[in-house]
Image (cartoon, grey):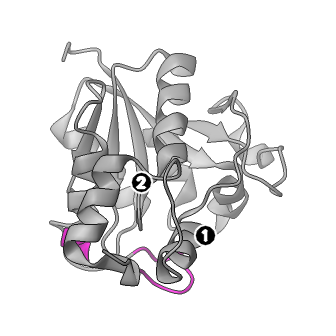
Amino acid sequence: MSEAARIGIYGGTFDPPHTTHLDIARAALQHAHLDKVLFVVAASPPHKSGGVHAAAGDRLAMVEAALLNEREMEVSRVELDRRGTSYTVDTLRELQRSHPNARLFLILGSDSVQDLPRWRQPEQIVALAELLVVQRPGAPAESPPTLDGRSSVVPFQERDVSSTRIRECLARGEDVSGMVPESVLAVIRERGLYRARR
């Protein structure tokens, strides 16, 4: 990577990672002319209702499988290696230290952007990274006024694919082809995740 790299930060539980996650990363790469997107696998996300369903090691393995053929995308275990709750501001500070000359872009769904003022040190988050906002189904399209000048909207066609829906389908033994990459589905089957049938 060059010293002036433009790096997208895409955090989540990825429980499991699905095709829309990859499509969002591709849209952000193109929109902001990013050099790469880091998929940051969350350990203990403070804003996730209902908790996580697969262990951290399984979720990491699924993301690694999803990104096998994606040259401009990498998995990051920065939050998995840090103990305690995964706060976005701490992750950005750590990534800034490891990429001191890079320009960071935080990829967020429009639903998360609405909650951002209630996150830990939101003003520091906006200072550390520019926001790339992806429209989510049912979420307001407008960003909070505090983000003026530090956010842009990534053109993206809304999709009705979610990790929750995929888990429910797998629990019922239904086919999720097309919703998750085949490489991810192979990990799910191999490890018996989400009560998926072999």
Q: Relative to residue 22, is residue 165 depicted above or below?
A: below
Residue 94 seen anywhere in this rendered image of the structure: no
Query: Given the image, on which type of amino acid does mark 2 rest?
Result: Gly
First reached walking from the N terminus: tag 2 or tag 1: 2
- Position of residue 195 in the picture relative to residue 132 (left or right): left
Is the magenta region chiefly helix, strand or loop? loop
Q: Secondary structure at mark 2?
A: strand
Mark on residue 65? none
- Position of residue 38 in the picture relative to residue 171 (left or right): left
Q: Image point 77% across, 45% down: which residue?
A: 143
Residue 175 seen anywhere in this rendered image of the structure: yes
For marks 2 and 1, give the CA distance.
19 Å
Image-quadrant location for residue 31: top right
Q: Relative to residue 126, is residue 194 depicted above or below?
A: below
Residue 140 part of the magenta-drawn span:
no
Q: Position of residue 52 (x, y in %)?
A: 41, 80
Q: Position of residue 83 (x, y in %)?
A: 19, 76
Query: Which mark is nearer the camera, 2 or 1?
Result: 1
Q: Which residues are magenta?
A: 45-58
Instruction: Please tell me which residue lies in front, 61 or 107.
Output: 61
Mark 1 highlights which residue?
Answer: 165
Image-quadrant location for residue 11: bottom left
Mark 2 highlights which residue?
Answer: 11
Q: Position of residue 142 (x, y in %)?
A: 83, 44
Q: Image point 51% across, 60% down: which residue?
A: 176
Q: Secondary structure at mark 1?
A: helix
Instruction: Please tell me which residue lies in front, 32 or 151.
Output: 32
